[in-house]
Amino acid sequence: MRHYWAQFLERHRDDICGRCLEIGTTETIRRFGGSALTQADAIDLAPHNPEINVVADLTAADEIAGGTYDCFVNQFTMHLIYDVESALYHSLRILKPGGVMLANFPSVEYCFARGLDMGTGAPLFVFWQFTPLHVENLLRGAGLAAGDIELEIFGNLFTRVGYQMNLAAEELTRAELESVDPGHPLLICVRAVKPAGWSADRPEHRTPWVPDATPARWNPVTGHYAA
């Protein structure tokens, strides 16, 4: 997935400028924004690393003033948020008019049956595996029109299976990686521009039920999680 996301960000690196926000780290916005950044912020539920200077829940991020950011790189997170409507609402609310959200939505993901502890403030659970139609409807429900949205899909049945088998992009051929099958996407990428006069109803905040279990621990060396 990160192979495709890097391609998408490379095409839209001009959007990563001014005051930018990223989830969990500032690595991506610094890599693609470089000298175009005036400020690089990172948001997460807890200050688990020194880069995080915005501690907030994206589904209830009222402490972040509206119209704050020029760009929000919202990556590899939306499938882990049950209240995705509230998360999208705040993702757009905190942008300046004309600001850009670059986001991705996995169509395939592992299922963390008892949660995954990555030390980010709360165990992670996978709530969603998205389709392009689902994402389009979420964005339109968040107050965006067709002209505000660019949606691109990546992947095919083979790359979906490869991802589930934990194969690296380098283990696949260029043809295998670049083939796009709309019926079997792996990753959905979005460029959404907040229009002037953006208005959306604030969704009712929803809290999920999660199992009462000891979460698995992430292994940063192998990239796997305990069974």
Image: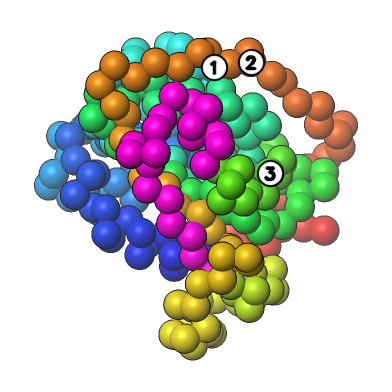
Q: Is residue 62 above or below residue 112?
A: above
| Crowd around label 3: few <14 · some 14–19 · many ≥20 (10 Å) | some
Mark with earlier residue (3, 1): 1
* Span highlighted in magenta in the image: 136-155
Q: Residue lying furthest left in this view?
A: 35
Q: Which residue is mark 1?
A: 60
Colour scheme in use: rainbow
The amino acid sitting under disc 1 is Ala
Residue 174 lies in magenta, yes or no?
Answer: no
Q: Which residue is mark 3?
A: 128
Q: Is residue 99 above or below residue 27?
A: above
Helix, strand or loop at label 2? It is: loop
The amino acid sitting under disc 2 is His
Instruction: Residue 93: give x, y in percent of width and height.
Output: 39, 20
Front in this rendered view, residue 200 or 85: 200
| Point 51% across, 13% down: residue | 201
Which is more foreground, mark 2 or mark 1?
A: 2
Q: Is residue 112 visible?
A: yes
| Point 26% across, 48% down: residue | 30
Q: Which residue is mark 2?
A: 205
Mark with earlier residue (3, 2): 3
Instruction: Residue 121: give x, y in percent of width and height.
Output: 60, 31
| Point 26% across, 31% down: residue | 99
Q: Is residue 68 above or below residue 139?
A: above
